[in-house]
Image (cartoon, grey):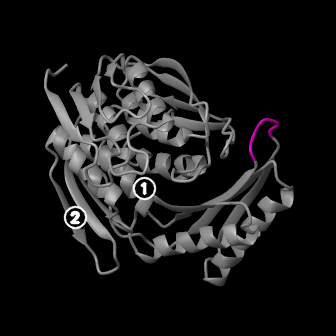
Amino acid sequence: MSGKSIEIDGAYGEGGGQVLRGAVALSCLTGKSVRVFNIRANRSKPGLQPQHLASIKAAAEVSGAELHGASAGSCEVRFVPGRVVGGSHTFDIKTAGSAMLMVQTLLPIMLAAEADSEVRIMGGTDVPWSPPVDYVRHVVLPGLRSMGVGEGTAVELVRRGHYPKGGGEVVMRTKPARGLKGIAATERGAVELVRGVSFCTNLPEHVARRQAQAADRALRVAGYANVRVAAEAAREEEGSPGSGVVLWAEAGGAMRIGADSLGAREKRAEAVGAEAAGRLMAELGSGMAVDSHMADMIILYMAVAGGASEVGVARLTEHAETMMWLTKEFLGTEWQALKSPSGGAVIRTVGAGLLG
């Protein structure tokens, strides 16, 4: 492992938990220790919250890292990575904190492991301010497969967890990535089909059905013909009620384009479905091959893959720009982002080949 240590200002750019999660993942991938200071300094509750603590402690466990300063409210941590061996791990966030943000942290780390891994995570699977589990399963992982992540890497949904109780469970299985390669995906082709999942937990079954019907109707009115949104209802004795819709479109390329909407108290099922459809159509309207949420996540993989990458993103978010800065701090990655008249951008780089 390299003796070099990286200093990261946690208030830079987006300034939230993404900086911390990205920093510990890149620390594990590069073998460089990292000190992150000013963590969430501009937030109403600065410092580490339970969600962030859970993710960085999980990263420390899977990599045999030394972790200093990991306590509630701490604004500075030091992370010294060890070996990512693989194997089985279980993490319970104990709140409705996002299991998917923990997946986002651990996935690149486990792809660099020496052996296969199975990581069981309990927490929120479909909660605000984080990607829903079905977006990860049906948009993120298929997109990473186009870069060389194998079919043996998958996320299984055991049960859903919603705010405020959480209690959801997922199992992430990974195989070491060998030969991760750059990606070329700029403009999308014609939309071939739209698929989706409409779900509800501890609510009447008709909620999921009405959400699905509203999403289907909005898409068909807009001219999308090959649409199918499945409706799923579940009962969980200890869980909170919740609902949502996740949609994804295939448009002739390696990447799927996705969008979602979560239900909320006093929000009609029809509004949830129509909102998800509207968000998907907005992403499709850019003409680009990668939606704005996937753009935030793919930056790290572009930086560590082997070879050049060029992607067209529906919108260049502050999250994506923050990840470009972070990868440059760790790897010296040079980025070029050319904004398009549609509001999107074409992002180019040459990866460092850490998983290549």
Q: Which residues are magenta?
A: 236-240
Of helix, strand and loop, which one carries label 2? strand
**Which residue is painted at 69% across and 60% down in the image?**
264
* Quadrant into which the N terminus falls: top left
The residue at the point 54 percent across, 37 percent down is: 154
In the rendered view, would you say 95 is above or below 1? below
Residue ID at (69%, 39%): 165
* Amino acid at dot 2: Ala
Q: Is residue 185 magenta?
A: no
Note whether 198 is above or below 116 in the view shown. below
Name the residue that disc number 2 marks.
337
Q: Is residue 131 visible?
A: yes
Mark drawn on residue 338: none
Q: Which residue is mark 1?
A: 294
Q: Is residue 99 left or right of residue 109?
A: right
The residue tagged with tag 1: helix, strand or loop? helix
Q: Nearer the viewer, residue 170 or 55?
A: 55
Q: Relative to 110, is 199 on the left or the right?
A: right
Marks 2 and 1, how far apart at CA:
16 Å
Left or right: where does residue 128 sit relative to residue 318?
right
* 9 relative to 74, above or below: below
The part of the image, by quadrant, that contains residue 14 is: bottom left
Instruction: Considering the whole magenta stretch, tell me its main secondary structure.
Output: loop
Asked whether residue 307 appears in the rendered view, the answer is no
Image-quadrant location for residue 150 = top left
Please, what is the three-letter code of the amino acid marked with disc 1?
Met
